[in-house]
Amino acid sequence: MRLCVRLVRGLALRCVVLGGMLVGAGVATVASTDVVVAQTVNSIVVQGSRRVEADTVRSYFRPGPGGRLGPAEIDEGLKSLYATGLFSDVRVNHAGGRLVVTVIENPVINRVAFEGNKKAKDEQLKVEVQSKARGTLSKPTVQADVQRIIEIYHRSGRFDVNVTPKIIELPNNRVDLVFEIKEGDKTGVKSIRFVGTKAFSNGRLKDVIKTTESNWFSFLQTTDIYDPDRIEADRDLLRRFYLKHGYADVRVVSAVGEYDPAKKGFIVTYTIDEGQQYRVGTVDVVSNVQAIDPTQLRSRLKISAGSVYNADLVEKSVEAMTIEAAKRGFAFANVRPRGDRNFDTKQINLSFIVEVG
């Protein structure tokens, strides 16, 4: 009678590439007889372990009812051992009245090196990757490190980067882990588009944002390099621009960058829901602080009735009135703006409420 359960995780040897062809963390095969004799933890024999203590291996097999190890407990222990990332091969055999656990330990990393990197220093990359010298080599960790390195280059506008990890086998179950990097060129923004806009031309809106299109003079600037963070910041610039020009309901719905292989660059599209333009209806200053006369603050208003609504001037009016209240001895006065829209007349009636802060 014989039970054999095996999990295998192979790592490439002799400088074998671990790149995008690696799929999956391991292969599981199970072969069993009709009847499995229950075992105890004390009956487990551990073979093949060098760095990991035999008792540590046994500790992953947790007995079930009555202190016995049935097929379910053995399977769970096997999975737990594999999940540690310490072993490339784990075999469990039941023969001769004993449970034999044979393990092949993952190699120890002698050093982590980087080749081909000019735009990112070794020190920066070593901090980012999880594979470390004197640590255990783990294929999932190496794959995650590859993606992390790629992300670092993406942040600097290099989307054509290619990272290939290689394993160099050394004596005593040690390896060198080398990441070969082809950095590629920076990826530029070939075109900027605006969808849903009527009030302003594309050229006017391009002047508002920081991202620019690549041209003959791109070597003098970096704003044409595709940067997701900058594009997200441009959304706020566009929103503020519209608010400054009376479009109080504006929504910058999305800012999307798509890589165009034919142009070898990104097409950035901003989708904008402009809404309607408002003018200022009435402007009022209301003081809920008895000692503050609202007429004393009116002179600090930066916006007037009949003008195009301007969110910037509303903020500046709040700031100016707050300073004026402080000069008059009310340092903790709080000025809160309120706008009531009239959709029919396309006006916003403004009230500046003075309260105790």
Image: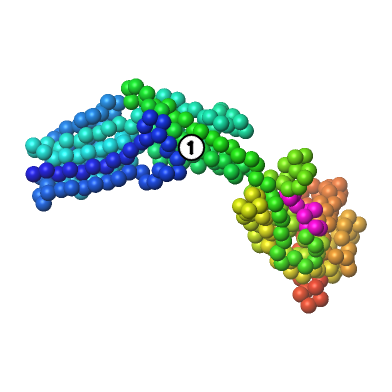
Q: Which residue lies furthest to the top in this view?
A: 171
Q: Is residue 15 visible?
A: yes
Residue drawn at (69%, 59%) of the image: 270
Determine whether 167 is above or below 253 in the image: above
Q: Which of 330 and 69 is in front in this view?
A: 69
Q: Where is residue 149 in the image (x, y as percent from the top left)?
A: 53, 38
Q: In which quarter of the image is the N terminus?
A: top left
Determine whether 207 is above or below 183 in the image: below
Which span of residues is magenta-colored?
A: 203-213
Q: Residue furthest right?
A: 299
Local packing at callout 1 (Cα closer than 10 Å; few below 14, some 14-19, many 20+) is: some
Q: Quadrant of residue 355?
A: bottom right
Query: Helix, strand, or loop for circle 1?
Result: strand
Q: Position of residue 3 (x, y in %)?
A: 15, 44
Question: Label 1 belongs to which residue?
Answer: 164
The amino acid marked with disc number 1 is Thr
Q: Nearer the viewer, residue 349 or 153?
A: 153
Residue drawn at (37%, 46%) of the image: 24
Q: Quadrant of residue 176?
A: top left
Q: Where is residue 248 in the image (x, y as percent from the top left)?
A: 76, 65
Residue drawn at (22%, 38%) of the image: 91
Q: Is residue 206 magenta?
A: yes
Residue 33 falls left or right of residue 89: left
Counting every numbered tag in the picture gives 1
Residue 133 falls left or right of residue 171: right
Q: Nearer the viewer, residue 216 or 345?
A: 216
Determine whether 196 is above or below 107 in the image: below
Colour convention: rainbow
Residue 16 falls left or right of residue 285: left
Residue 325 falls left or right of residue 24: right
